[in-house]
Amino acid sequence: MKNNKAVFLDRDGTINVDYGYVHEKEKLNFIDGAIEALNLLQSKGYLLIIITNQSGVGRKIYSLKVAETFRDYFLSELKKRSVKIDGYYSCYHSPEEHCICRKPSPFLINKACTNLNIDKSKSFMIGDKDSDVKCGENANIESLKISDKKNLLYWAKKIIIMDNEKFINK
Ligand SMILES: [Zn+2]
């Protein structure tokens, strides 16, 4: 049974400030409203799933081990703030490798949906880049784009409103 609902999230530029190839602890700065947004979505029963392109590994800017250490730090910093991430899916390839998992490919979203029994019709993808929106669309998931005026908290609140309306219309 596919009965879970999820919000798929880009990482850099959506949850934390994107300085380009973020992989150092001191470069982890959460964007205003992001923690509140994640807590809100979590409290409404959404699984939180990170879908991130980390081509810095494929480009040999940092190693896979460094990427994984940063991932663990990122997850522990969220946990300290009461945010539990249910899935973390990363593509480590450079564009030149023409892999199957790099966004805008829907591969990682589809993988998460299978692993966690996610109902796509109840789920969303949120990111700051066109490739994030494309990725969600390629997976047939409603996709929302972060901008200066529309941050993660803006979209989290919108999702909750949409959710409530669906409930009322039933
Ligand atoms: Zn890949």
Image (tube, rainbow, N blue to C red):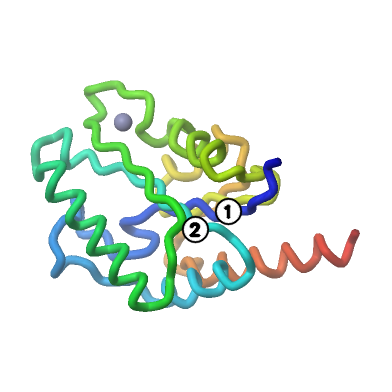
Percent across and percent down for residue 44 are 63, 69
Percent across and percent down for residue 97 are 23, 22
Dot 2, how many residues are within 10 Å of its Cα: few (below 14), some (14-19), or many (20+)? many
- Name the element at disc 2: strand
- The quarter of the rendering in which ligand 1 is drawn is top left
Decide: is 54 above or below 23. above
Kindly check if marks 2 and 1 are in contact, taking CB atoms under 8 A apart as contact. yes
Residue 68's disc number: none
The residue sitting at the front extreme is 1
Percent across and percent down for residue 8 are 50, 51
Q: Which residue is mark 2?
A: 48
Decide: is 103 above or below 87. above
Residue 6's disc number: 1
- Name the element at disc 1: strand
Q: Residue at x 67, y 68 (%)?
A: 160
16, 64: nearer the viewer: 64
Q: Residue at x 55, y 68 (%)?
A: 42
Quarter location, residue 23: bottom left
**C-alpha separation, residue under disc 2 versus residue under disc 1:** 6 Å
Q: Residue at x 55, y 53 (%)?
A: 144
Dot 1, how many residues are within 10 Å of its Cα: few (below 14), some (14-19), or many (20+)? many
Considering the image in quadrants, where does the N terminus appear?
A: top right
Q: Amino acid at mark 1?
A: Ala
Q: Residue at x 59, y 61 (%)?
A: 46
Percent across and percent down for residue 67 are 18, 49
Give left or right: position of 38 versus 71: right
Give left or right: position of 9 versus 102: right
The residue sitting at the right extreme is 170
